[in-house]
Every structure is written in C-alpha cells, then in structure tokens.
Amino acid sequence: MGLILVQHDTDSPALYGAVAAAVAVSRNCGFMHIAAHFDTARHADAEQHVVATGGLAASGLCWFERLSGKPVSPPATVGEVLDAARLADVVVPVHQAFMAEADATSMLAESANEVINVVERGDHFIDGETDVVLAWRDRFGRVVLKQAEATPAAAMKIALVGAESDHFGVYPAALASLADAADSLSAAVEIDFIDPVDLRDADAGKTLQPYAGILLPGGSDMKNVAGQTAVAAFALDNSVPIVGLCLGMQTMATAVAWKTFGRENANLAEADPDADIKTFRAMAGEKTADGGLLPEHRTGDQITQPIPGTRLAALIGADTSIRCNHRFRLNPELVEAMQMRGLRVAARGVDGAIVDAIEVIDHPFYIGMQGHPELSSRTGAPHPLIVAFLQAALLRQSRAAV
C-alpha cells in the first residue's frame, strides 16, 4: 500500500493527469487528484472536464477515463489522498504550475512511497530516472499506452472549429473523439483547425469549401460564437455534414434561427445579452411543465430521451446517459417557428423541458447535442453520433469524387 506521485512539469492543461493516469492503469492502481487552478483568461477551457457525479475538473482528466473506462472522482484533499494510500496503492498527478494549494506537493511528497518525474521526448513520456516509457501521444494528441501504428495518407479533410493550440493543449476530448471514430471506420482523416475568432462571415465559403465535414465543439469562450454560427450557417446552406457538441449545438440552432428571424436579430443570450431574439436563455428561475424549477446548472451524467423517428434515435438508445454542463437552454418560444424552417427536436431532457438535441430535416447530416458525447468516446469504442457524422462526410467525399 502506498502513495505514488507522478510529477510532470508541463504548462499544457490538456496533459494534467495524463501520464499519471497511464501509470495508474498500467499498474492497476487507484487514481486520485487534488484541486487544480488554471489561468482561464489564457486557457478558457482548462477546467471543462465534466465529472460524472457533477461539477467540473481539469480537462486533462479525460485521459484517466479514456484509459481506464472508469469515471474520474471529484478533487480530493491531501488528507483524503493520504487516507486512501494507507489502504491501497494510489497514483496522484503533480503539476506544480497548476496546483491550487501551494504546499500540497510538499505535503504529499513527505508521505510518498515513490516519485516519478516525467520527461517528454518527442511523441512519448518517460520516467526521468529509469528511461522507461510511461505513455505515448499520437498525431491526434491522444495519450495511449502503446505506440501508434503508422497511418496511411489522409484521404478526407475534416474541419474542427477552434484554435489548434486549444484542441491539443487545453481541451483534448473533441479531437480525440474524432480520431476514435476515424479509427473505427478505418478512415484516413486529416483534421484541420479553423479558428472561429479569425473567421469572417464573408470568408466562410472559401475557408470551408475543401472539407467533407465540420465538427463544432463545446467551450466556454463566447468570443467563438460568431465564427461558430457563421460556420453552421454555411454548412446548413451548402449541405455539408456537421455535428455540434454543447456550444456547437447552440450555434447550429442559432444558424437555423438566422434563417427564421434574420441574421442580425438572433443570438445566444450568453454571447449577446442585448440580442432582440435570444436563441438560448438561462435556465435559472425558469419553470418546468409541472411548475417546478429547472436546474440553474445542469451538470454530470444526465438522462436524455431521443425522440422516436429522428435520426438521432436511430443512433442512440432510449434514456441514454450523457455528460452535461450547461446553464442555458434552447428558447422554447422559438421552437415552433424554427420547425417551419426545417429544425427538428431530436431529444429532450428534464422531463421534456430542455431540448437536448436538434437536427435538420432534408440535410445530409446536421445534428447537435446539448451534452458532451466526446466525453463518452474511447479508443475502440467511439461515440455513435461522431461515427455517423464521419460516415456522412465519407459519403459526401465519395459522391464528390464521382
């Protein structure tokens, strides 16, 4: 029984806990983490990993869930870690740049049975003392336990909206989920990053024309909303397969609202509190059909109910659990008018009070989910929504080649 510290001197939030997770899984040990603190002005999505039981934690903790198949626990105190280590072997990540408590590292080190200092060498991480390889990182940023095989030349281009530095260095789960889906289809995919902050509406066509499909990720940074919505509008008008995750669904629905109410009128309340038509508004204080109150913050594993007959219902089962992290919902007063422009509600949650997914009828693939399906993806077990999206992109690619 004992405490194993894995010290990794990195300034990448996406690697918080990554190598420690690999060590824990390789040795069949327990895994715990203590509170972390990030500069969210620099890395807005550094603490956007949704814990199954509710709440948020460091985004890099997705690697423990991906490697172990087990949910990560909420942050523990130093005392809780020491108590657990008396009963079983426990691995704890230490990233000095991110520790919320300045003296936590020294307190843990005093009782540690082993300290592993991680060194990065190219595409792998080694134990600085023994030179033993602890984990690898593939070309999609996935932290894995064995070296990735060489991949064939990419035959299909997919656009992942967001800065490359964010997807590799801050919130890695969306990129990893795309790679999981591509592997399952044996599809050679090249993923390009489209920074929504730099995207101008008028340039969307030229920028997005080369891509067989587009993924709109989630995120907490509202400066991405205008560019994301412009991307969604292009995909809607040009029949390009597109999938949206959380904020991505919100901007996809807003693109439909643009067609319904006018481009200058509709926007997310979170992004533009002064918008004439608020496509998504805060749940706080709003009532359910039976007179109860909606949660102010819907977080953790939640049940979503796909609507029979929708495309989404053919992909996921009834009463499916999905990780959620949102404080806003699709404005129910707008749904009927948006349905006249092709929107279809594909899933609902909280006894029907919240639209959990949308799709567009007569479009090759236009589906967004309010939750985070990327957090349910694993190597060898991709999320079916993202697999279906890539299948639609492959179909578009094959038809374009004829």
Image (cartoon, rainbow, N blue to C red):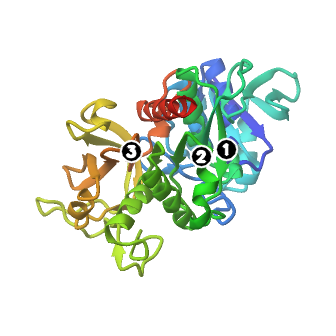
Q: Quick check: 275 above or below 331?
A: below
Q: Nearer the viewer, residue 242 or 223?
A: 242
Residue 181 seen in render: yes
Q: Which residue is mark 1?
A: 192
Q: Residues within 10 Å of mark 3 (few under 14, many from 20)?
A: many
> How far apart are the two marked residues, 2 and 1, measured between alpha carbons?
6 Å
> How far apart are the two marked residues, 3 and 2, measured between alpha carbons?
15 Å
The residue sitting at 75% across, 24% down in the picture is 134
- Count of numbered circles in the view: 3
Q: Which residue is mark 3?
A: 367
> Label 2 amino acid?
Leu
Q: Check whether the beta carbons of the residues at disc 3 and disc 1 lie within 8 A of each other.
A: no
Which dot marks residue 160? 2
Q: Check whether the beta carbons of the residues at disc 3 and disc 2 lie within 8 A of each other.
A: no
- Mark 1: secondary structure: strand
Residue 103 seen in render: no
> Label 3 amino acid?
Ile
The residue sitting at 41% across, 52% down in the picture is 249
